[in-house]
Image (cartoon, rainbow, N blue to C red):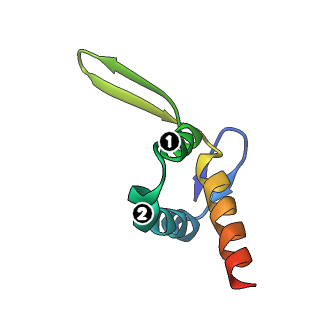
């Protein structure tokens, strides 16, 4: 289970499903939409002499998963 500080939680299957739905369409998205998705996922990137630190948004994947599920349900209606 992936848990964030604000108590959003996704299980591994939900994470995999969200990313699998996103992967095939990534190259088809406008750059602005790609940037929006990245900003939903990543809060901060810090580069230092010893490497990088990436801080992910705890609710980013759940937001994307919800959006993708909503779009999929609308397409199936």
The structure residue drawn at horizontal position 61% and vertical position 46%, both measured from the top left corner, is 60
Identify whether 58 is placed above or below 54: below
User: Does dot 1 land on a helix, a strand or a loop?
Assistant: helix
The structure residue drawn at horizontal position 68% and vertical position 60%, both measured from the top left corner, is 67
Q: Residue 77, percent across and down? A: 76, 84
Is residue 75 found left or right of 33 in the rendered image? right
Quadrant for residue 25, please give it. bottom left
Taking the view exactly as shown, the residue that stands out farthest to the left is: 49
The structure residue drawn at horizontal position 38% and vertical position 28%, both measured from the top left corner, is 53
Q: Residue 52, percent across and down? A: 32, 26
Identify whether 39 is placed above or below 13: above
In depth, the one of 24 and 49 nearer the eye is 24
Taking the view exactly as shown, the residue that stands out farthest to the top is: 49
- Looking at the image, is mark 2 or mark 1 earlier in the sequence? 2
The structure residue drawn at horizontal position 54% and vertical position 71%, both measured from the top left corner, is 13
Residue for badge 2: 23
Residue for badge 1: 38
Q: Which mark is residue 10?
A: none
Count the labels in the image: 2
Taking the view exactly as shown, the residue that stands out farthest to the bottom is: 77
Is residue 39 found left or right of 48 in the rendered image? right
Identify whether 43 is placed above or below 31: above
Is residue 73 found left or right of 55 in the rendered image? right
Identify whether 41 is placed above or below 21: above
In depth, the one of 43 and 12 nearer the eye is 43
Quadrant for residue 4, please give it. top right
Q: Residue 62, percent across and down? A: 65, 55
Q: Distance between the residues labelled 2 and 1?
A: 13 Å
Quadrant of the image for the N terminus?
bottom right
User: Does dot 2 land on a helix, a strand or a loop?
Assistant: helix
């Amino acid at each position: 289970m992936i848990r964030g500080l604000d108590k959003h939680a996704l299980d591994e299957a939900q994470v995999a499903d969200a990313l699998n739905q996103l992967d095939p369409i990534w190259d088809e998205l406008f750059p602005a939409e790609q940037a929006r998705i990245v900003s939903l996922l990543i809060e901060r990137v810090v580069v230092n002499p010893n490497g990088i630190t990436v801080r992910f948004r705890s609710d980013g994947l759940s937001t994307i998963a919800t959006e993708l599920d909503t779009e999929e349900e609308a397409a199936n209606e």
